[in-house]
Image (cartoon, helix red, strand yellow):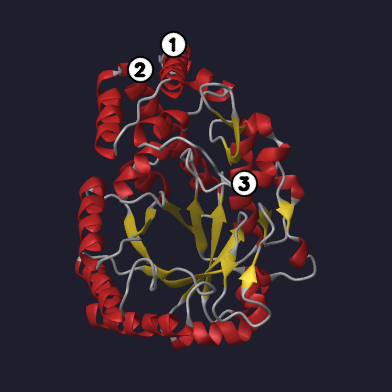
Amino acid sequence: MSYSAIYTYAWDLAEVGIGEAVRQFAGLGLDTVTVAGSYHAGKFLRPHGRSGKVYFPEDGTIYFKADPNRYGAIKPAPNSQFSDADVIRQLTANGKLATNVWLVLMHNTLLGTRHPDATVANAFGDRYVYNLCPSAPEARAYAKGLAIDVTQSYAVSGLSLETPGFMPYTHGFHHEFALNRPNRWLDSLLGLCFCNHCSAGAKKAGINAASLQARIRTDISDYLAGDVDLSDDMAEAFWLADTRTDGELAAFLSWRCTVVTSLVAEIRAAVRKDATVAVIPSVARPTAGAWYEGSDLVALAEAAGVIEACFYEPAAARVKADLFDIKRRLRGKGKLRGILRPAWPDFASKAEFLAAVQALLDGGVNDLAFYNWGHIRAANVAWIAEAMQLTKGAS
């Protein structure tokens, strides 16, 4: 089944109306609507919004009708705006385009605040409530419940899974603030999880997590107590050296990938068999950086079947380079899709955007998605129609 998709939100679809939105998408040459089924907070500028231009979605809620019996201790929070409406049901009933559901899994501040024991804990035990930990059984049950629920209750074509793993320390949390210079080494150490579930899992894998945690806690404390600042190249070198020379850290980072891969494999095994499961490995730039979040590209491709990579780069040449690296890592495993943003900050012109589309097509990526209908101007939406003309030429 082909996949030419537009990413979108329930509130944008509801405002325009399902029939009109589908008509517009089909007119662009698309065959799929990828709609958020679970999502986080935000502050979004809506260029073609009719009822307002700035929108604040409810944090950590879902946009479908959930069956609470499919979940454990952590249950999804319904979105109050859609208590009487079911946009995904309307989309599937319309039937003119396939409906793919985009699920944000472990990034959920609302549920993390309600269930702090199921969230990431740094080396000092500080909880990152924006990140449910993929090692926590309750969080894993929640993620699987979402995937099972939406594929069993709705005639959707598939799922796109985002944030299945460990999020970075630097996140963009509300009023995220520090009066010391950020750097890759410090941020990477602060982002490691040593919750009870991670510590126990690592120990079972033969890793001395307690020793590693104590060492990292000391390194961070010494750095913050001193007056040394790290330039970008030095911080990068320090972090690379740690990952290569500290065998415990290297093993721990590798073990994190098995945690995320096993979760995705469990989701793939549990959902409706004819539904596709794609993994968005990370929005890290370039995609190779996804490993830090526990996203082993080839392992995820084998577990899910599809990698849906974000080619969020400011030039066609960088898109082409990222594609080269992703294909090199996948070595032919799984299917590769690409997501592009036809607007700033990625592309300053239509010509550059179309060149990026052509680079993906030339590299064998024929399944494309465009992000995000509600965020981009009408003029940029029109670029998608020209991109779809290129795909016809490639087929």
Element type at mark 1 = helix
Q: Is residue 274 visible?
A: no
Determine the residue located farthest toward the front in the rendered image: 227
- The vertical placement of 328 against 64, above or below, is above
Q: Which residue is mark 3?
A: 108
Q: How many marks?
A: 3
Work out how far the residue at label 3 is from the one at label 2, CA to CA, in angstroms: 29 Å
What's under tag 3, amino acid-wise? Asn
Q: Is residue 260 visible?
A: yes
- The vertical placement of 265 against 81, above or below, is above
Element type at mark 3 = loop
Q: Which residue is mark 1?
A: 211
Picture residue at 38% right of the left edge, 80% below the top: 384
- The vertical placement of 68 against 91, above or below, is above
Q: Position of residue 189 (x, y in %)?
A: 42, 28
Q: Position of residue 319 (x, y in %)?
A: 26, 62
How dense is the environment of label 1, judged by Cα within 10 Å: few (below 14), some, or many (20 and up)? few
Sequence-wise first label, 3 or 2: 3
Q: Which residue is mark 2?
A: 248
Residue in the foreground of this view, choosing between 320 and 152? 320
What's under tag 2, amino acid-wise? Glu
Say if mark 3 contacts mark 2, CB within 8 Å. Answer: no
Say if mark 1 contacts mark 2, CB within 8 Å. Answer: yes
Element type at mark 2 = helix
Q: Position of residue 27 (x, y in %)?
A: 46, 88
Picture residue at 69% right of the left edge, 46% below the top: 110
